[in-house]
Amino acid sequence: MADSTSRRVTIAPSLLAADFGRLREEVTAIEAAGADWLHLDIMDGHFVPNISFGPTILAALRKHSNLPFDVHLMIAPVDLYLDAFIDAGADHISLHPEAGPHLHRSLQHIRKAGKKAGVVLNPATSPDTVSWALDLVDIILVMSVNPGFGGQSFLTSQLPKITRLRQMIDAADHPIALAVDGGITMATAPKAIAAGADTLIAGTSVFRAADYAEAIAALRGDV
């Protein structure tokens, strides 16, 4: 397993698990509780079997938070919507290799706009998919569930993938965050971190907790 002793863990609560009737209040509360990023899952009902929200919601929330907005686009074709989320205030934009014909060009477009660019790997997607574009990647997100719905169980089959990606990132010539999303709980977070993750996307384990700050600290390993 990878050495995780020197890495501070970034916690990015996923807005998908928040109370949608109180989004502004939820974003304010999660920032006050110590979240590092706010993760926004954008789903189109085509690339994944669910629909969430679009750039209008992101833009409305942007004025109420100083957190980095970490946008995960589950949209195909994805390139048509990059500028909409850039203009709405995304700080990071991550996409799936399967969602467009030219991953390299899409990443170039995001970085040219001054945003951090990410690649998302589904459970059956190989790390090799991103190996020839690492120079343009700021974030690699490993899906430890099949994307589309919150509350799923963590797929332990993804742990070796996380470790392999950790090795690839350590050999790269610039910093790349290694994130994991799906089934992240107090029980599974240490496994993901031990495998090499430095960023955890957590939905229900934070937004359904009685105390957001305690939940974030527990996931980070501070308690």
Image: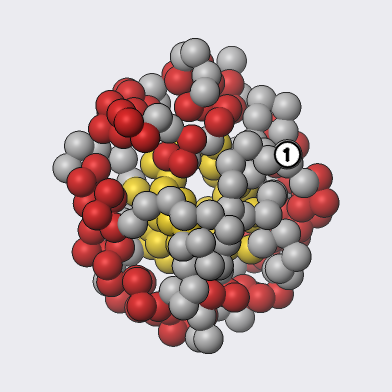
Q: Image height check: is 132 above or below 147? A: below
- Secondary structure at badge 1 equals loop
Q: Residue at x 58, y 58 (%)?
A: 49
Seen at 51% across and 86% down, the residue is 102
Q: Position of residue 121 (x, y in %)?
A: 64, 63
Q: In the rendering, at what x and y percent does residue 2 appear?
A: 75, 46
Please tell me which residue is depicted at 68% across the width and 40% down the height of the picture.
Answer: 152
The residue depicted at 28 percent of the width and 71 percent of the height is 83
**Res 166 quadrant in image:** bottom right
In this view, the residue in front, 177 or 87, is 87
Mark 1: amino acid: Ser
Residue 69 visible to an observer of this rendering: yes
Query: Split into 4 quadrants, where in the image is the N terminus?
Result: top right
Residue tagged 1:
153
**211 sits to left or right of 56:** right
The image quarter in which residue 63 lies = top left
Query: Residue 172's spot in the image, x, y percent?
Result: 59, 67
Can you say whether 207 is above or below 108 in the image?
A: above
Q: Is residue 178 visible?
A: no
Quadrant including the C terminus: top right
Front residue of 129/123: it is 123
